[in-house]
């Protein structure tokens, strides 16, 4: 099977992890702040908080921004469910904004129209979570402009996008948002096994997220309600969680960061090669906005059903049966049974639903060979044209 995604772990990565196993700290030792510093410096962000998943990062980001019961969070329906679930964890309500049919990202025009209506109804969002789908940055400047006008905060769900750029600056620098979230899941650009990170230029938000990732416990006398009883003393000053990243995982992340630019460059070369090989087939190739430089976590094509004799499902199953691990990213969140019970229904977000009917992720990862890529294209061609 040629999977849609695959991590690379090098001998250097293994050596870096083994070193930690022989030292004094396995969790929350020196490798965690080192990893945070490396990622923050790379992105140009003042603060970085490493956690055990991007889902955890989204959760504490929402809490740090004060999201709670009676509040509203809006995000894209084309994303992993965590982008929406983070609001429900806080007791808030979720809504969605339809996608741009070219970038597959949250559409600023659809956002503006929805904001105009919501303002009249007194239901403006407290937070908007644009998702950098496939690694391509959203139109953050337009979203930020709307944020200033309508008073919402912005969390960039950049789970796909570490190493990407927007207007020639690294995703994660915080110029257009309050907090940015990365994922280090094994199929992402770099990995820590499982892991995530929240980046912000606001020290108060950073301190709040740092507290929340570790049970709401502090050893800082300045944050305590009274002077410490002794050197052993700590206080729980908030209700937090065990969202900590281990030193073992951070050591892997430190090593992987040395190859981040190489990985993104390789993904672009592979995507460019797909573009050329797929040019004459009845499908839509990924379109790239000139203001962005994608991290190319995914290479998503759109099958043009009216131009072929097979159904989408038949094409998908044919490829899977022949060892090509195509996948679908993502089923629109509003169509999931849980969200339908919240009142969402088919027809609510037409662009997202049309995308779902056509989108297919082809295998893309740094170690895929040209021969494997050629096999993917050959079998896809047979499925679409025979």
Image (cartoon, rainbow, N blue to C red):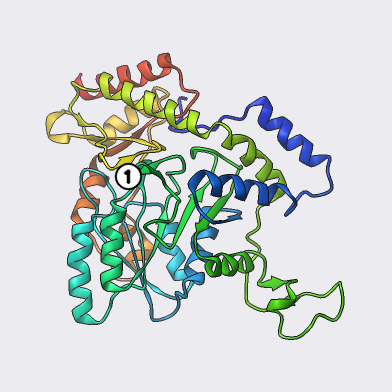
x and y, in percent, of residue 189 in the image: 49, 37
**Compared with residue 1, is residue 81 higher up or lower down, i.e. above or below?**
below
Question: What residue lies at 45% left-to-right and 50% top-to-bottom?
Answer: 172
Q: Residue furthest bottom?
A: 226
Residue toward you, 14 or 95? 14
x and y, in percent, of residue 135 in the image: 38, 42
Q: Residue furthest top?
A: 371
Q: Quadrant of the C terminus?
A: top left
x and y, in percent, of residue 267 in the image: 41, 29
Mark 1 sits on what residue? 167
| Number of numbered discs overlaid on the protein picture | 1
* Residue 330 falls left or right of residue 259: left
**Compared with residue 210, is residue 266 higher up or lower down, i.e. above or below?**
above
Question: What residue lies at 45% left-to-right and 77% top-to-bottom?
Answer: 68
Q: Within the image, what quadrant is residue 97 found in?
A: bottom left
* Residue 72 falls left or right of residue 195: left
Q: Within the image, what quadrant is residue 224 found in?
A: bottom right
């Amino acid at each position: 099977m040629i999977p849609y995604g695959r991590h690379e772990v090098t001998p250097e990565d293994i050596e870096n992890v083994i070193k930690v196993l022989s030292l004094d700290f396995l969790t929350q030792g020196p490798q965690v702040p080192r990893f945070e510093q490396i990622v923050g410096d790379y992105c140009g962000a003042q603060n970085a908080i490493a956690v055990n998943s991007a889902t955890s990062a989204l959760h504490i980001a929402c809490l740090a921004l004060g999201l709670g019961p009676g509040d509203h969070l809006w995000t894209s329906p084309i994303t992993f469910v965590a982008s929406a679930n983070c609001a429900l964890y806080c007791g808030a309500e979720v809504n969605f904004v339809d996608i741009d049919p070219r970038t597959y990202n949250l559409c600023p025009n659809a956002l503006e129209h929805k904001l105009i209506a919501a303002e009249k109804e007194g239901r403006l969002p407290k937070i908007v979570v644009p998702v950098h789908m496939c690694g391509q940055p959203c139109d953050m400047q337009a979203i930020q402009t709307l944020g200033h006008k309508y008073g919402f905060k912005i969390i960039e769900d950049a789970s796909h996008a570490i190493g990407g750029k927007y207007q020639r600056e690294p995703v994660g620098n915080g110029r257009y948002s309050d907090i940015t979230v990365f994922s280090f899941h094994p199929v992402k650009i770099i990995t820590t096994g499982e892991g995530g990170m929240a980046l912000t230029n606001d020290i108060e938000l950073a301190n709040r997220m740092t507290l929340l990732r570790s049970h709401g416990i502090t050893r800082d006398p300045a944050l305590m309600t009274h002077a410490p009883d002794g050197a052993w003393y700590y206080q729980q000053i908030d209700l937090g969680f065990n969202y900590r990243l281990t030193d073992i995982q951070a050591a892997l992340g430190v090593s992987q960061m040395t190859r981040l630019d190489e990985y993104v460059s390789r993904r672009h070369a592979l995507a460019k090669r797909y573009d050329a090989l797929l040019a004459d087939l009845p499908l839509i190739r990924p379109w790239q906005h000139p203001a962005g430089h994608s991290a190319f976590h995914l290479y998503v094509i759109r099958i043009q059903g009216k131009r072929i004799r097979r159904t989408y499902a038949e094409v998908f199953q044919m490829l899977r049966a022949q060892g090509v691990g195509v996948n679908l990213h993502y089923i629109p969140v509003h169509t999931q049974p849980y969200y339908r019970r919240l009142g969402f229904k088919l027809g609510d977000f037409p662009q997202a639903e049309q995308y779902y009917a056509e989108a297919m992720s082809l295998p893309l990862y740094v170690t895929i060979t040209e021969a494997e890529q050629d096999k993917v294209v050959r079998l896809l061609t047979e499925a679409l044209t025979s």
